[in-house]
Amino acid sequence: MSLESDPARSQSSGASAVVWYATIVAIGLNLRPLLTSISPLMTTIRDATGLSFYGASLLTSLPVVAMGLGAFGTGLLARKLGETRGVALGLIAIAAACGARAFASTGGALMLTATAAGAGVAAIQALLPAVMKQRFAHRVPLAMGLFSASIMGGGGLGASLSPLAARLGGSWHLALAIWAVPALAALVLWGWLNRGARAAAGATPAQAQAQQHPAAVPVWKKRRAWTLGLHFGLVNGGYTSLVAWLPAYYQQHGASVAASGSLLAAMTVFQAACALLLPLAAARFTDRRPWLIAGLCLQWIGVVGLAAWPEAAPLLWVAAAGAGLGGTFSVTLVTALDHSGDHRIAAKLVAFVQGLGFVIAALAPVVAGRVRDLTGGFTAAWVMLAVSITAMIVLTLAFSPRSYGRWLGLHGGPLLER
């Protein structure tokens, strides 16, 4: 009997999909507060720890470096523990790192927690898309859109609620440590959802042999993998720079801590909306390039507005930048997943793209902080971002759907065709 002819089974399957989507959202909400909770409290943290602008920028860049370098090791993690346990381990790392911030009183201790949390995020961001590719083969844009939107939404919550928590609790330590709670909640939900699942490490010899060929694919040798990673990295360099320095930029223009944090929160609202809507709009089209270019153009408008007319329409600029960042983030990952019909090969590509991309993105706030130290302002950093976005618009033209089946240097084959 087909699923369509069995209403009870269809309803059960639909309910299961809703639970999965809800779990994906719950996990995604935990992947950015470790970054955005720092930004609106940066001045307070610098005063308490004595960090320079460059040193403070490491609180944002170090977890992004860990996201990148950690992604390269997720293949081994998946083989040893399986994707389910790997995601759980990532949530544990985030919860432990955030909880430790309750006792971190020095810049070095905060950097250690930032690195540990970033490694946890790396595991989740690399392994969960493989799960989504396998479970939602024909609904990847929706699943990835929800995941990306929840990531951006979590960033907005971190930016908006952390100053409130610091004010109510009288401690910036508490405002940073409180983000361990939703990570633990997501861990419980993930464990309940997968309570009967087997880890990949427990696969039978036949299953292990079936997985041997995809595992041997040398993704890191492929030009397309490097091109996608460069694209992802420079696009997300805009995100890391704005998360690190947007509040400080507007505080320099006279805004209060709460007002500047609200601007960052507003930016993430538009990020979340477009992270969901842009991949859904692109879902019916094989060619994702027009949607990538649309997102990049929005980001370019926002960054140029911040540089040229910061006080004229700040909400407009952060809305445009946020919408472009969110939409491009999710559609870029969907495009990477499009490159193979086999979820294991697609997962290896996405892990490499994120690994290279986040290492590149980690450099952006460090460069912006150094430019701020040298020039006394952030305008030059925004101009540099605008130039890199322009270059990525040109690079996007290379991602033709006709290239999806031949990027590995092989032609045809069930594992390579979409």
Image (cartoon, rainbow, N blue to C red):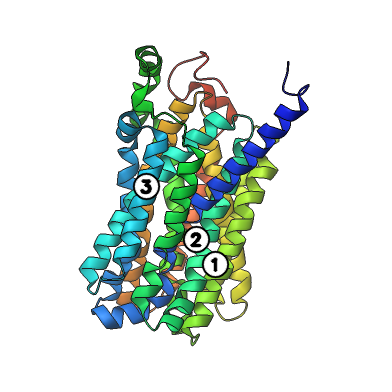
Instruction: Identify the residue position indicated by label 2 in the image.
Output: 386
Query: Residue visible at 59% across and 57% down?
Result: 272
Check disc 3 and give the amino acid type. Answer: Gly
Q: Is residue 395 visible?
A: yes
Front label number (3 vs 1): 3
| Crowdedness near tag 3: few (<14), some (14–19) or many (≥20) residues, C-alpha within 10 Å | many
Q: CA distance from mark 3 to mark 2?
A: 33 Å
Q: Quadrant of residue 94?
A: bottom left
Q: Kindly identify which numbered label has been placed on residue 304.
A: 1
* Residue 81 horizontal side relative to residue 25, left or right: left
User: Of the residues under marks 2 and 1, which one precedes in the sequence?
Assistant: 1
Callouts 3 and 1 close, C-beta under 8 Å: no
Q: Position of residue 129 (x, y in %)?
A: 49, 38
Instruction: Identify the residue position indicated by label 3 in the image.
Output: 90
Check disc 1 and give the amino acid type. Answer: Val
Q: CA distance from mark 3 to mark 1?
A: 36 Å
Q: Is residue 313 above or below residue 133?
A: below
| Crowdedness near tag 2: few (<14), some (14–19) or many (≥20) residues, C-alpha within 10 Å | many
Q: Quadrant of the N terminus?
A: top right
Check disc 2 and give the amino acid type. Answer: Ala
Query: Residue visible at 50% across and 72% down?
Result: 161
User: Of the residues under marks 3 and 2, which one precedes in the sequence?
Assistant: 3
Q: Position of residue 215 (x, y in %)?
A: 36, 23
Callouts 2 and 1 close, C-beta under 8 Å: yes
Q: Is residue 234 above or below residue 104?
A: above
Query: Residue visible at 44% across and 32% down?
Result: 347
User: Of the residues under marks 3 and 1, which one precedes in the sequence?
Assistant: 3
Q: CA distance from mark 2 to mark 1?
A: 6 Å
Query: Residue visible at 26% across and 76% down?
Result: 52
Q: Secondary structure at mark 1?
A: helix
